[in-house]
C-alpha cells in the first residue's frame, strides 16, 4: 500500500502545482494509524498529512456534491466501489463529470478497527498488509492476523474491483473481489419465518439512536432537504423509542435508495450501534435482480433505473408475495 | 352501565387506496348495484395508483390500519397510460420488503379493479377483510402512541 | 471495604432488583448499553465504553411529558410523569460520573427541570473504577481520577472479585440491603489495581492535551479562528457525536397526535442538525462549520465560562471512536488548545 500512497501523493502535488485542478479530495492522517479523515487539499504544501492506508474505508464521492461546485476542477481518489457511487451521482445530476478529475486507486480491502479491538489489539501504531495477512504493531507488541478476519464487512462481500470510471489509474497489484456471497445473509433471513424475521429486525432496529449517520454518509441520500428533517412533512420526528419510527425511517430510507443504492456499505460502516443496515438495501437489490433482471446501480452514468422503468410483462405484486413470480 | 362480558369480535381497520378513474368508480358501481362490502374499509381516493407513496402505506399502518390494499386500473388501461406499471414495480418491492421485515404478507395487497367491475370490487374487499380478520390485529407495524387511551 | 466473588454477581444483581430497578451495561444484538437488568440478561461490566452513556437514565432520549385531551371546549392537561420507584445505576465509569455533575449544573439550576430531578433523586449511583483504559481515553486531562470515581458506592473489579465501598447515605442504605452477600476485605487488591491503572493512564497518547487557551477571555479569538473551516470540512452533519456524548444536553419538545389527544414529548436534539437553530425568522447557523464550531465552543469555552471553569467534556473518548469520519474533540483541542500541542 505504501507505494500506492506515495504515488497518490506525488500525483496530487503535480496536479495542484500545475494548476490542472484546484483541489484534491483524499485522506488526511488522524490521531492514530487507524483513523484517517476525508480531507480536501488545496495546495501542495498541505499534502504533508496526506495518507492512504488500510483504514481509508470512507467513500469520498459524496463530498463532490459540495466541493465540485467550487471554482476550478476537483480531483478525487476513488476506490473501485466508490466509482459506482460517482457514476450514480453523475446520473442523478448531483455532480458534473467534466468538473472532476478521477484518479482510480488500488484497494485490497479495507480494515475494521473494531474487529482488531475484538481480537484484543489496542493502541495500534502501524498496520502492514502482507498478502492475506496483516501485521499489527501496537504499544503492546506485534501480532499477525488473517486479513479476512479483520476486513470491514462491506469488503468481505466486495462486488467488484473494476473501476467504473477513471481519468487515470494508480494500481500496482492485482485486486480481488470479496470471497463471500453478498446475498447469503439476505437469503438466510428470507428462509426464516415472518415472526423470526420480525424478531431479528426488532432487536437490531431497537438499537437505533436516530443519529442519521447512515443517511448523511450515503451517496444516494443526496436530497437537499430530507423528508425526515422537514417539519412540514408530518414525519419529522426525532423520538427514537417508538418502534414504529425506527421502522418507518429505515423502510423509507431503504426504499428511497432502492434501484439507486450501489451497495457501497457505508451505512453499516458508520452505524455507531453496528446495525446491519446493508441487509435492508440488499433485499431490494436482490428482488430487483430476480424480478426485473440483473441491475447494478452506478455501472453506468446514464440510462434508467429499475424503478423509473417497466415492462408490460412485469410480475404481479400478489404473485411476488406468494413466491409465484418468475 | 352494562358491562361488556363477551369478547368483542375483531373488526380490522382496512385502508383502501383507490384510483379515481377505475376502482373508485368501481366502488360506486358496487354501491349502486346494491352489492355490499364491509363498512370497515376506508377508501382513500387517489388520482392514480401511482400516486401512492410508500410513506402513505406506512402512515396508514401507523395510524392503526390492520391491512392496506391498493387498487388501480388493469395494467395497460391506466388513465395516464403508464402510471400503474410503475405502481406494480413499486408495490411488488415494497410489500416484499415489508414481509422481509417480518410484516405478515396477508396485510398488504394490490388488486386491479376497473370502473365496470363493481361486483369484483365488492368481492375483493370482502375477501381482503376476511383475510385480515383471520390474521388478527396489526401489532408489528403500528405506533403504540397512536393507540394511547384506547 | 467489602468484596464478593465475580461468579456471585448475578446474585447481587438479583438482590438489588428485588426492590429497585437496576440499570446496568447489558449486551443486546452485539452492542453494550445501559438497560434494566432481568434474569438471563448478559451483563458486561468489562465493556469500557457503552455506546450510549448512562445519561440516558436521567435524561432519556425520549420522554413523554404531558398529554392534552379535549372534550368540547374543555382541555385537560395530564401529567405523564411515571411513579418514581427507586433505581440503582450500576457500573458508571469516572468520566460518565463526572458528566452527571455537568448535567446537574444545567438541569438542577433554576429553573429546575423537575423530570430530571425526580429521576436523579430516586437513583443510587454505583460507580466502577477503570482498569483497562484505552488509547481514546483522556479523562485525566479534565482532572478525573479513573481509578477512584466518586458516587454513592464505588466498586472495583478484578479477575476474581468485585470490591465495594460506600461513600454516601444512599450508598449505605444500598449496602445494608445487600451486605449479606459480601465478606470483608480487598483493600490491598484495590490499591494494587489503582497503582497499575494510574501507570497506564499516564502513558495514554492524549494524557498531555493542553487546554490552556480555552478560557472565556479568548472567546472571540477562538470563535474567529480560521482553523474551524478545515476542522469541520469532513463533517457529515450527523448526530452521532452528540448522541453518544455523556454531557450533551440539548433537547427538542414536540407534539404527537394520538387517537384521542396530543402527546407532548421531549427528545434529544443535536446542534449538528441543520434544523437545530431553525426559528420563525430563519436559521442563524446555515453552514456545517458554524454548527461544528458551536458544539466544541460550547464544551470548551461557553459552558466553562458560565460554570467556574468546569469543562463540559469529560474525555470519555466516545466521539473519538464513533465519529464516522474520525473527526473529534481531540483534533479541536490539539489545533486550538495551546502551546503544548503546537
Image: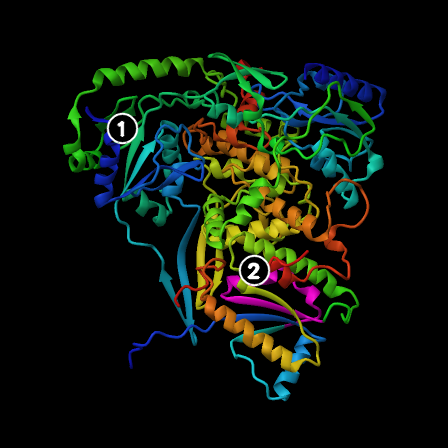
Q: Which residue is pictured at 77% across the width and 62% down the height?
A: A312
Camera-side residue: A102 or C240?
A: A102
Question: How far separated are the C-alphas under marks 2 and 1?
Answer: 48 Å
In the image, residue C198 lies at what x, y percent? 36, 15
Residue lying at the far top of the rendered structure: A141
Name above or below for residue C278 compared with residue C300: below
Using the image, name the chain to which the residue with label 2 belongs.
Answer: B
- Which contiguous range is marked in magenta? B45-73
Badge 2 is on which residue?
B58
Asked if badge 2 and badge 1 are on a common chain, one would say no
Depicted C210 relative to depicted C320: above or below? above
Check residue B70 for magenta coloring.
yes
Residue ID at (69%, 58%): B89
Seen in the image, is C69 located left or right of residue B94? left
The spot of residue B88 in percent (x, y) is 69, 62
Q: Badge 2: how crowded within 10 Å, few (<14), some, or many (20+)?
A: many
Q: Nearer the viewer, mark 2 or mark 1?
A: 2
Q: Which quadrant would the C terminus of chain C be assigned to in this image? A: top right
State the SS at label 1. strand
Residue under numbered circle 1: C154
Amino acid at each position: 500500500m505504501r507505494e500506492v500512497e506515495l504515488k497518490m501523493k506525488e500525483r496530487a502535488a503535480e496536479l495542484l502545482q500545475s494548476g490542472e485542478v484546484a483541489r484534491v479530495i483524499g485522506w488526511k492522517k488522524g490521531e492514530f494509524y487507524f483513523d484517517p479523515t476525508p480531507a480536501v487539499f488545496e495546495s501542495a504544501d498541505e499534502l504533508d498529512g496526506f495518507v492512504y492506508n488500510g483504514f481509508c474505508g470512507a467513500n469520498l464521492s459524496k463530498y463532490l456534491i459540495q466541493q465540485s461546485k467550487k471554482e476550478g476542477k476537483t480531483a478525487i481518489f476513488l476506490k473501485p466501489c466508490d466509482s459506482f457511487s460517482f457514476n450514480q451521482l453523475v446520473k442523478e445530476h448531483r455532480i458534473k463529470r467534466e468538473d472532476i478529475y478521477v484518479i482510480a486507486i488500488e484497494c485490497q480491502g479495507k480494515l475494521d478497527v473494531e474487529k482488531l479491538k475484538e481480537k484484543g489489539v489496542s493502541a495500534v501504531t502501524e498496520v502492514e498488509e502482507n498478502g492475506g495477512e496483516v501485521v499489527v504493531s501496537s504499544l503492546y507488541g506485534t501480532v499477525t492476523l488473517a486479513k479476512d478476519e479483520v476486513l470491514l464487512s462491506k469488503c468481505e462481500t466486495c462486488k467488484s474491483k473494476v473501476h467504473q470510471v477513471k481519468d487515470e489509474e494508480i494500481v500496482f497489484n492485482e485486486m480481488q473481489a470479496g470471497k463471500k456471497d453478498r446475498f447469503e445473509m439476505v437469503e438466510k433471513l428470507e428462509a426464516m419465518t415472518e415472526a423470526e424475521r420480525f424478531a431479528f429486525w426488532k432487536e437490531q432496529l431497537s438499537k437505533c439512536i436516530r443519529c442519521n449517520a447512515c443517511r448523511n454518509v450515503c451517496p444516494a441520500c443526496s436530497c437537499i432537504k430530507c423528508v425526515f428533517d422537514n417539519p412540514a412533512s408530518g414525519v419529522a420526528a426525532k423520538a427514537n423509542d417508538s418502534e414504529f419510527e425506527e421502522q418507518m425511517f429505515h423502510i423509507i430510507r431503504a426504499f428511497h435508495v432502492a434501484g439507486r443504492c450501489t451497495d457501497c456499505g457505508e451505512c453499516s460502516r458508520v452505524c455507531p450501534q453496528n446495525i446491519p443496515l446493508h441487509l435492508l438495501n440488499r433485499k431490494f437489490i436482490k428482488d430487483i435482480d430476480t424480478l426485473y433482471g440483473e441491475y447494478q446501480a452506478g455501472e453506468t452514468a446514464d440510462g434508467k433505473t429499475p424503478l423509473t422503468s417497466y415492462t408490460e410483462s412485469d410480475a404481479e405484486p400478489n404473485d411476488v408475495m406468494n413466491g409465484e413470480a418468475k | 352501565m352494562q358491562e361488556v362480558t363477551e369478547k368483542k369480535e375483531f373488526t380490522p381497520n382496512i385502508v383502501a387506496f383507490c384510483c379515481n378513474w377505475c376502482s373508485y368508480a368501481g366502488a360506486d358501481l358496487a354501491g349502486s348495484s346494491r352489492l355490499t362490502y364491509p363498512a370497515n374499509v376506508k377508501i382513500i381516493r387517489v388520482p392514480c395508483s401511482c400516486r401512492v407513496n410508500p410513506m402513505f402505506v406506512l402512515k396508514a399502518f401507523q395510524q392503526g390500519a390492520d391491512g392496506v390494499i391498493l387498487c388501480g386500473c388493469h395494467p395497460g388501461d391506466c388513465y395516464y397510460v403508464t402510471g400503474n406499471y410503475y405502481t406494480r414495480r413499486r408495490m411488488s418491492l415494497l410489500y416484499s420488503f415489508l414481509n422481509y421485515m417480518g410484516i405478515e404478507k396477508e396485510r398488504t395487497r394490490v388488486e386491479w379493479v376497473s370502473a365496470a367491475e363493481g361486483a369484483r370490487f365488492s368481492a375483493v374487499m370482502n375477501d381482503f377483510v376476511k383475510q385480515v380478520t383471520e390474521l388478527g390485529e396489526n401489532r408489528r407495524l403500528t405506533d403504540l402512541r397512536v393507540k394511547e387511551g384506547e | 471495604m467489602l468484596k464478593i466473588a465475580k461468579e456471585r454477581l448475578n446474585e447481587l444483581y438479583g438482590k438489588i432488583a428485588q426492590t429497585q430497578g437496576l440499570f446496568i451495561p447489558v449486551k443486546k444484538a452485539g452492542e453494550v448499553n445501559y438497560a434494566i437488568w432481568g434474569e438471563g440478561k448478559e451483563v458486561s461490566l468489562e465493556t469500557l465504553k457503552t455506546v450510549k452513556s448512562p445519561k440516558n437514565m436521567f435524561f432519556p432520549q425520549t420522554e413523554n411529558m404531558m398529554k392534552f385531551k379535549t372534550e368540547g371546549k374543555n382541555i385537560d392537561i395530564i401529567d405523564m410523569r411515571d411513579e418514581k420507584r427507586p433505581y440503582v445505576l450500576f457500573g458508571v465509569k469516572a468520566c460518565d460520573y463526572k458528566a452527571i455533575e455537568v448535567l446537574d449544573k444545567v438541569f438542577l439550576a433554576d429553573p429546575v427541570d423537575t423530570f430530571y430531578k425526580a429521576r436523579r433523586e430516586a437513583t443510587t449511583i454505583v460507580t466502577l473504577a477503570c482498569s483497562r483504559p484505552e488509547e481514546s481515553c483522556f479523562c485525566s486531562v479534565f482532572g478525573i481520577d479513573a481509578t477512584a470515581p466518586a458516587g454513592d458506592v464505588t466498586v472495583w473489579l478484578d479477575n476474581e472479585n468485585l470490591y465495594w465501598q460506600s461513600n454516601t447515605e444512599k450508598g449505605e442504605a444500598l449496602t445494608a440491603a445487600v451486605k449479606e452477600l459480601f465478606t470483608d476485605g480487598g483493600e490491598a487488591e484495590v490499591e494494587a489495581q489503582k497503582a497499575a491503572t494510574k501507570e497506564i493512564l499516564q502513558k495514554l497518547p492524549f494524557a498531555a492535551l493542553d487546554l490552556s487557551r480555552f478560557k472565556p477571555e479568548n472567546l472571540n479569538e477562538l470563535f474567529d479562528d480560521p482553523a474551524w473551516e478545515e476542522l469541520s470540512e469532513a463533517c457529515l452533519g450527523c448526530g452521532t457525536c452528540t448522541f453518544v456524548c455523556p454531557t450533551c444536553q440539548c433537547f427538542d419538545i414536540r407534539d404527537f397526535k394520538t387517537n384521542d389527544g396530543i402527546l407532548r414529548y421531549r427528545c434529544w436534539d443535536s446542534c449538528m442538525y441543520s434544523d437545530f437553530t431553525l426559528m420563525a425568522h430563519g436559521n442563524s447557523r446555515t453552514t456545517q462549520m458554524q454548527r461544528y464550531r458551536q458544539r466544541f465552543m460550547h464544551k470548551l469555552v461557553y459552558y466553562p465560562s458560565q460554570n467556574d471553569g468546569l469543562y463540559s467534556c469529560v474525555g470519555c473518548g466516545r466521539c473519538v471512536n464513533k465519529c464516522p469520519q474520525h473527526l473529534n474533540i481531540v483534533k479541536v483541542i490539539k489545533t486550538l488548545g495551546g502551546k503544548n500541542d503546537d
